[in-house]
Amino acid sequence: MKKILKEVIPPFVLKPITGLFYGWSGNYSSWKEASEKSTGYDTQIIIKKVKDALLKVKTGQAVYERDSVIFDKVHYSFPLLSALSLVALRNKGNLNVLDFGGSLGSSYYQNQNFFTDTEQFNWCVVEQPHFVKEGQETFADKHLHFFYDIETCLKQYKVDMLLLSSVIQYLENPLSFLDEVIGKKIEYIMIDRTPLLLKGDDRITIQKVPKNIYEAKYPCRILNESKLLEHILKHYDLVFDEQTEESINIKNAVFKAFLFKRKK
């Protein structure tokens, strides 16, 4: 449920490589129609590439991984780092994150150095079964944990922040999912690296990943920003929002990040 950094193939808009187009295309009438023309996120090729890259980070052979790509320096999401720091500060150093769709812990490895010395730090990834199995066997440590579902995670940890980083656009019914997690009454919700339309109706597209990353095509729903905010702000207050660095070749669409705090 992750996408590639624009540093890899700048600016990731209308980028032809060997005559092929990579990015977002189409305006499909249904999720089913887009899915039938896509490959999905659950192939063994993807998990192997992500695993191999993150193992290099875990063992110190590489500094940072994102979307299975290795980098020689950490590329921080500063909206995310700001949110994590704020939540930890307000919780007297305690930070328990539920990272839904968090792969094998990419965001944990990105940010762990800032929080491993805190009194209580737990990063809980909820993912597809084959990612959870690999995560539990290979990557879990005293701070990083993997769960098959949100309910099991919440029974074990009092989660301070739900992280939805580059994930809700890949859900068939993102607003229904948000209704479900809003009902869990988690104090903070962070939405990061998410494409949204500044005007116009929601749009269902297909996102094609460059072959030098891995071959994949995902159905991708780009929500209208006002519609998303109206849905969440019934139950949460907006702490901050920020346009993020990713680019998208869809008119009137940008990538954004939001931090929300549950209403009293």
Image (cartoon, grey):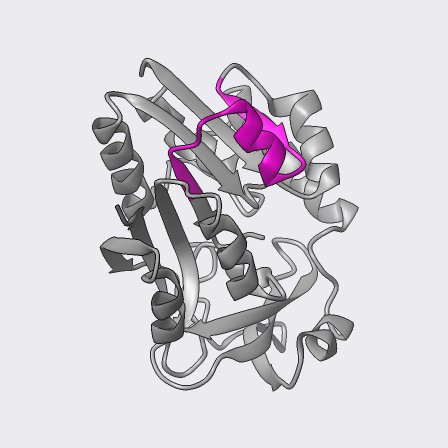
> Does residue 158 belong to the magenta stretch?
yes
Residue at 70%, 22% in the rendered image: 137
Does residue 211 show up? yes
Based on the picture, tell me whether residue 264 belongs to the magenta stretch.
no
Depth order, front residue of 161/37: 161
As drawn, is 79 to the left or to the right of 178?
Answer: left
Up/down of 7 relative to 115, above or below: below
Residue depicted at x 35% and y 40%: 187
Q: Where is residue 32? Give x, y as percent.
A: 73, 75
Q: Quadrant of residue 176?
A: bottom right
- 167 on left or right of 149: left
Of 46 and 28, nearer the camera is 28
Closer to us: 202 or 155: 155
Nearest to the observer: residue 159 or residue 82:
159
Q: Residue at x 23, y 21 (%)?
A: 92
Q: Vertical placement of 172 versus 191: above or below? A: below
Residue at the image position 36 percent from the left and 81 percent from the top: 252
> Could you tell whether 220 is left or right of 82 in the image?
right
- Is residue 206 depicted above or below 49 in this figure? below
Quadrant position of residue 145: top right
Please report the bounds of the magenta region as a residue range.
Answer: 143-162
Occupied quadrant, residue 126: top right
Residue 180 spot, x, y in % from top left: 54, 53
Q: Is residue 48 visible?
A: no
Q: Position of residue 81 (x, y in %)?
A: 30, 39
